[in-house]
Every structure is written in C-alpha cells, then in structure tokens.
Amino acid sequence: MLTVAIANARDPKAAAGAPPSPAPGRVVSIYSEVQTNRIDYPLPLPSVLRSPFKVVDGPKSSAAGNPDEIAKLFPNLFGQPSAILVPTAVPPSEMSQKLKVGVVLSGGQAPGGHNVICGIFDYLQGRSKGSTLYGFKGGPAGIMRGKYEELTAEYVYPYRNQGGFDMIRSGRDKIETPEQFKQAEETVLKLDLDGLVVIGGDDSNTNACLLAENFRSKNMKTQVIGCPKTIDGDLKCKEVPASFGFDTACKIYAEMIGNVMVDARSTGKYYHFVRLMGRAASHITLECALQTHPNITIIGEEVQQLISELNEILAHDIVDEGGLWKNKLREQSRALFDFLPKAIQDQLMLERDPHGNVQVAKIETEKMLISMVETELEKRRDEGKYKGQFKGQSHFFGYEGRCGLPTNFDAMYCYALGYAAGVLLHAGKTGLITSVANLAAPVEEWTVGGTALTSLMDVERRHGKFKPVIKKAMVELEGAPFKKFASERDEWAIKNRYISPGPVQFFGPASNEINHTLLLELGAQA
Amino acid sequence: MLTVAIANARDPKAAAGAPPSPAPGRVVSIYSEVQTNRIDYPLPLPSVLRSPFKVVDGPKSSAAGNPDEIAKLFPNLFGQPSAILVPTAVPPSEMSQKLKVGVVLSGGQAPGGHNVICGIFDYLQGRSKGSTLYGFKGGPAGIMRGKYEELTAEYVYPYRNQGGFDMIRSGRDKIETPEQFKQAEETVLKLDLDGLVVIGGDDSNTNACLLAENFRSKNMKTQVIGCPKTIDGDLKCKEVPASFGFDTACKIYAEMIGNVMVDARSTGKYYHFVRLMGRAASHITLECALQTHPNITIIGEEVQQLISELNEILAHDIVDEGGLWKNKLREQSRALFDFLPKAIQDQLMLERDPHGNVQVAKIETEKMLISMVETELEKRRDEGKYKGQFKGQSHFFGYEGRCGLPTNFDAMYCYALGYAAGVLLHAGKTGLITSVANLAAPVEEWTVGGTALTSLMDVERRHGKFKPVIKKAMVELEGAPFKKFASERDEWAIKNRYISPGPVQFFGPASNEINHTLLLELGAQA
C-alpha cells in the first residue's frame, strides 16, 4: 500500500490552514527551499514600464469575423483602437489619481496567475500611491457574491513567483444572466471600483468584454481589462502572442515525457503512450513533441482535417477497393491516412455518429491506442507476420502541470501583463486585453499595450441568437511550429531522436529558454 | 486527440538511433540544454579518494541472520571483514597493475547508474592506467551471452550525470542455474576479467555474491563487487546508508505531488489520491510525505503491523461488539485503527484469503480508496449526515521518476560508489558491496570502503532448501523518519500544511539538499 491521499481545501477545517501565512517571517516554515528562493527572485520589467511613458491609440479595430454582429452586440465598445505604450519625457498629469481595482482569477489554473496580481499590485503601489486592490475570491462567483479580500503588501508577498491560484482561488462560474450582471454591478458600486481585471481564457475574456460593455452602457465608471491565461495556448493572436501558463505546463509535461523516453530506451520493456491535458487545440502536444521528439505524435487538428475530408468523400463518393478514392484527399491528409495503422484507418472509414461524424471524443485515447495496437499485432501474429512482444504503458499528464512553479518566462511575462493591466486602467481604458509582445527579445525590449477584446471576436449562433466568442487559436497546419514538426517526424518515427528536457531550472544557462512554439511563431512573423 | 506515443528501443530500426552519439561534438544536437549542461558538471570526490590511501580491513563479519547457514552457502566468502580507505603517505606498490573490469546494470532503472560507471571508468583511467572497462549489455543476460561493449572515454562521456540506464541498458535476468553460472565463467575467462561490478538491488547483489563465491571456489581470478541501486530505498544498512536513485525519484514524485497539492488548494474541486511506484517497502511514500505533508499517508509497514495483530486476534479471540477486543492492539495500531474510516475498518475485520490474510496486493489502491470514500459518503448522504460534494482524482507516479536526471546528491554519490568499486577491485577484494558513508557531511568528508555482502544476508527456505537473501530494509516504525511523520501527521490531516518542493534544481541554494529520510536516519545514528 503506497498511497498518498491529499484532501483539498473545500473542507472548512482543512481550509483554515490553507493559505500560506501572509507574514513573510512564517512563510519559510511551510514553503520548500525552492519556493522560498523563488519569492525574492527579481522580476525585470520592459524598459518602457520603467520610465515615464504615454499610452497612444492605434487605428480603429474591427472583429475576427462578422463585424456587423459584433458591433450590434457591443455598441459602446466596438471599434476601439488598440493602445501602445511609448516612452515620454514627463508623466502625464492624469496618471496620478488613486484607483480602486478588483482582480479575479477565472477558470483552470495556469502557472503565473499570482504574478499577474503582483504586477497589478506593484503598478498601483509604484505609480498610483494610495490605490486599493481587491481580490475576488473563488472566481467570478466572488464578484457576484461580493466575496473579496483587500490585497496588501503582506498578503501578496508570499505568492510572488509561486504556482497555483491559491492566493484568491479560482472558479468556473460565468456572469451571464441579467440577475448576475445586476449582482456584479452592485458589488463594483459598493466597492466604488474604478477597474476590474479578469484573468482568464477565451470564455472569461469574452465575459470580461460583456461586463465592460454593460458597465459602459450604464455610464458606470468601472473599466474592465482582460489578461490572457490558459495552459492550452489557444488564446492568442498577433497582438497577444501567448497566453500565460503554456510555457510552464509544457515544460513540466516535457520533463515527464523525456523521463519516460529515457526509461523506454533503457529497458526496451514498454511502449509508452502519453495523453496530455487539454481541449480541442493541440498546442501543448505539439510543443511537447518539439521539445522531446516522440516516435509518433497525434495532432488533433490534423486528424480533424483528414476526418472532414473523409466525411465529404463518404457522403458523396464511392470508396473503391482499389483505393482510387484516396486521390481526393489533400496531399497532407493522404500522407497522414497512409501513415495510420490499418485498424485506425478502418475505424475512420466506418464509424459515424448519427450526425455523420467520427466519434473520438471522451475516450482515454492512450488506452484506446494501446488496445488497438494489441489487436492489430495479435492479428499479425496469427498470420505469422509478427513474433515480437508488445507491452503498452499508458500515462496521463495533467494536473501536475497546471500548478507548477512558473518558469522564469511565465513569471516575467505575467508580471508584465499585470503591470500592463494597471497602466491600461489608469489610462481610462476598458474592454481591452493586455498585450505584451516582442517576446523573443530580452525583457527590456518587450512592447506593452492593450488590444480591443471585440477585435478578437466572432459570433456563434446558439439557441437562435448570436453569441460573441473569442475565436480559439487552433494549431495551424500551415504554421511554423506544425511545419517544423511535420518536417522532422519521419525521422523521429524511425530513429529514436528522444530529447529529455529535464526539470525546469530557475538558475543557470537553461533557465531562460522559451518554448519552441512561441519562438517559431515569432520567427515566422518576423 | 492529444496523444504522444513513444515507441521503445526494442525495435531494431528504432534502436539504431538510440544511444546518443559517442562523439561529444554531436551530443549537443540531440540533448536538451539542461542535459548538455549536466555533462560537464564537476563531480567532487571524497578527499580520501583524491590523495594516496590504503585499504584497511575491519573485524571479521557475520550475517544478518542464520550465520551458520550463510557460512555453509558461502564457504569461501563468509566472515570477510569490511574494508575502509584511510589516507596514507605513499600509494602501495601493488596498486599499479592494469585491470580488466566488466560492469553490468541489473534490474529497474535508478537515476545515477551512469555515474557509477563513470566513477569506475575514471578510477581505472586515473589510478590504473591501461586498464580496460567492458559494459555488459542488457543486464546479466549480457554476461551470460557474452554481449558487451568496450567503454572508452568517448563512449562514456555523453552519459555523465545523465538519467537512465541507456549507456549499456539493463535487464532482469538472473544467473541462477549451473548452466548459467557456466556461461558467466566462460565470458569472464574469455575477457580475462580481473573484476566485475554488479550495479543492482537486493536480489542482484545476492546474485553478485553467489558469483563471487563461485569464481573464488574455482580459483578464478575474477572478483565481484556490488553497488547499491534501487529507487525503493530498501537496500540499506549501517555501512551502506543509502541506495542510489532514491533521492532523485522521491524528489521528482514530490514535485508532482506538490503541484497537485497547489492545484487542490487553488480550486477545491478534487480530492487527489496518489499512488507511488514501489514494492513492499514504503520509503518512497514516507519520504514524499515528509517533503510535501499530505493530509493522509498510508505507510504499508504500519498497516502490515496492524494486520498481523488483527490476524492474531481474529484467530484466537472473540471480537466483542463493545470493542473491548481493541485493547489487545498495541497503542500505535489502536490509534491507526481508530484513524481509519469505518469501511476500511470493516474490510480489515472481515476479508481474509484462504491463508487467513487480508488481500490488499495488486490493487490500484488509489482507485479503490476513491470508490470506498464514495460509498461511505453516499451512505452518509442517505443518512442525512453529509451534504458535500466529493470528486476523487487518481494519480500514479512511477516511470516519470526512475529515469530523471540524477540530483546533485545522486550524481556525486554514484560517482563515489563507482570510484569505490574500482578501488576495492584494485585492492583484490571480492564479495563486497561498496560502502560510502557519512553522507550528511560535505562530500570531502564522506568515508569510502566496502562491506561483506554475506554480512547483509539471511536465509529463506524455498522448495525445501535454504536460499540466501539480503534482508530488505523496510520502514522501521521505531525509526526516526517514521517517528517524525507520526508526530506531525495529525496536524497535516486537519490543517493543510502542503509543501510544494518544485522541480529539482541543479544550481542555486536548493540544489544540494538531501532527502529527509537519509538526514533523519543519519541524525538518529549520530
């Protein structure tokens, strides 16, 4: 019996001891040495934030799709320009007022969230003395229920550079119904909030924009600024090149994958099948593949492209025995189809749900693949074509990565995001998402600004109504990261080119590497 | 679909590209930056190994149990003294001969194995110029089949401070039958081996001792030295205070556990149940608990003690409704029993296999516990005593830890173990296990020597014959690590005292911490 059971903090008795003590003196006793060392790790700011700057507006924005519908949904905010910080000789005088600001963590955890809050806090302390920062507890529900904590220097200090969202905790509630909007209004009025920072993914940022529109439509002073959070990496665009947490999560998963690879190479006993946390977008899997070079990597977007084409063919064409039908596939899809084991090919050709779609969701893919390989090899064994031994070992890496200590990149990026949110609020902006860019350069050269949330939006038709949505950034099959992967995977498949990234380092030469996806995407833009 | 599948190296096509290139120039291209940086990380040696030393014998040894039977099984080796290195002014002249040495990795991987080999190699290069080192491939089977590789400086170099056993790979075969001993003899005669180093756990070291006895009984010159390897930490005694790999594996598991704890604290959504790799001994679980402070930790040895007492009571006494029978339990067992949920208490009282034992083996304990908690809470809900929400999330951490990059401690400890093995062979010793001690002190002050393998042995009766076995070191309920845990766990259960150790660091202030178990055990000895 080798089990460690960890209760969570919902139990009120347990929760009593949950947060690290806000008094720095006591932190050390319940923090590990690495955690303690991280607290005082210096966070450099982009140089534009270290000297006087002004906030300059860009051109009027549009939407990611259906601008007419977005304009109708956001009559007060649609078309807002993006904002960019530029150095100036003297700080503008309006930047000296005191602010009351709330902050909320929304949705699944991502390493670095605490540093966004620290960035907001430090900005207010440094540039807007006498300001107050409130942390809404347990996600958007904290706004609706008016549950908050005033964030003081002592309260915030122990969370600097720490993983998790435990400073104020997160939640998945949404502010959606008229009653819920009313509750939110009451809370921000009661606290006399000048601003609210929503740290979240695509849904939460859509929600942030709806709140901003709502407050503006009622002539309330409360501005709303979003920050891009998600380990999935699917909230990004040109102006917001990365969502925070992706860098850390991928590095933790890649550490585990690299260790398993070394294990495989050392014994030859198992074939390892790894599934990684995530939803529709496969950025995490692609990044981990670029970091570790597995023999086979399945990128959902590629499979999805193949499936769409197969759906077309199955609906309209004759699938001939000779395989001439395959010529109707695009070159890349044809190559993928031919690459797949026959058993998977057969499944793709045969099984459709009532809507004509392949049913692949909600499967423990790693276990399904092992059993498919077993079946295929048994068949080959019966035919006398296979004499080997196959033992599959499945892995799922998920929770381990969401709450790790943020990498130096995520720590610095988040701190800049938080600082930027403070700046944008101070400059009177609302309905923007913080935009920190030029990330392949040293921190000093990062650019800082904000982008209209409406410019990231399209609409979806739900229950007969248009709903605004921030378009999820999927893996682009024409993008630089996928192309790099596609150009190397044949070699990885045949030769073992495993790379073991090792544990995230906070000191030393490897501590400031940034992930392949970001580097390749930025390179492709340049 | 988010799956990364990793084939292993058994596929000959895949294996062709498996080992990192022996040419240092090419290593960098398939190593991560962290791996590359590790290669040249300097490995300090204990000061006794850096200057001239002599090997001094201690008193005659006995056995861990049944010395008469051990003496019969090892007529040539029984009673050998331990050896200890002491500084001397001039190196003894017999230390200058050239040696031919073989090395084999036996059993499951443990971080640091490569450094043992590097230590042997560097010793031979430095102190016995012109010597040859052969690596037997794929474990003891490599000895029997005569499969080996000559280990040159170029061959060894890329594996310095790297995880895994992929330099020569490992295997689980044993040299047991007379035919197998014959094969081993043929191989060592063919290679004209002066010595063989067996890097392995308790079974492999027992096997090493049987080989040593066999070679000695036939007047063959080949000496055999064992090195203590196992992440389980169950091969240890006063002279051999630690088996290598335990430190790294525990730190990797503790990193994951710490991350999951922060996750739990951040959302309050799940109760996490973690199972860790290992066999009967619970050192890994105990160490991880000391590093991370879970709410509940189940230590197999403690449960085993309770079960033995329950077995006695159920066999001989009446279990009265009033619970008076419980007074027959020892105080600690009574406390554990009362601590357990009623459902588990009931199971312990009722279910016995045909031999009268509780059936707990081969269960995915983490999933079993989740379902038991669910059942119990449903019952309480029906009774109106529970209104909460319980969601269990299970984890198994195993392969991720066996092949991680060795911590600084394991890297240095293994290097010293390898060096020690070279010294012992050079000094004409056989049937010893390397003994590097005083490990809580700086490396310079570590002591170096060897201990008679027969002194660690007892016998077990199998198929009517006595078989020698090295007694597994289980968690001692009276030992310092368990006592420390027992004194704190009540607080951990009620208050969340989670600690997140973070990723293993190779630089900086946290990089030279050693594990709690070793520190507490050494402290208790002092």
Image (cartoon, coloured by chain):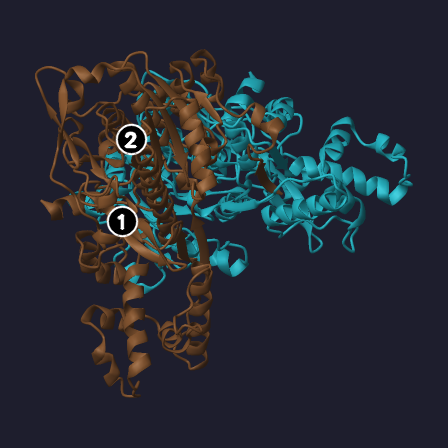
Chain colours: A brown, B cyan
Point out the tag, 1 or 2, that comes first from the N-terminus: 1
Where A217 sits versus A149, above or below? below
User: Residue at the spot x=29%, y=18% of the render?
Assistant: A124
User: Residue at the spot x=11%, y=39% of the render?
Assistant: A59
Quadrant in which the N terminus of chain B appears: bottom left
Residue A333, position as x, y percentages in the image = 24, 70
Query: Is residue A112 at least partly visible in the picture?
Result: no
Tell me if mark 2 has few (under 14), some (14-19) or many (20+) residues whose alpha carbon lies within 10 angstroms of its own.
many
Q: Which residue is mark 1?
A: A72
Residue B429, position as x, y percentages in the image = 45, 35
Q: Quadrant of residue A296?
A: bottom left
User: Residue at the spot x=85%, y=30% of the render?
Assistant: B327
* Pointer 1 chain: A
Name the amino acid, label 1. Answer: Lys
Where A495 sits versus A211, above or below? below
* Depth order, front residue of B291/A105: A105
* Pointer 2 chain: A
Tell me if mark 1 has few (under 14), some (14-19) or many (20+) residues whose alpha carbon lies within 10 angstroms of its own.
few
Q: Quadrant of residue A492?
A: bottom left
* Depth order, front residue of A495/A375: A375
- Residue A414 numbered tag: 2
Compute the Cα span from label 1 to label 2: 33 Å
Residue A234, position as x, y percentages in the image = 30, 48
Where B425 sits versus A300, above or below? above
Q: Say whether residue A372 is left or right of residue B76.
A: left
Name the amino acid, label 2. Answer: Cys
Quadrant in which the C terminus of chain B appears: top right
Residue B43, position as x, y percentages in the image = 30, 28
Asked which secondary structure carries label 1, the reply is helix
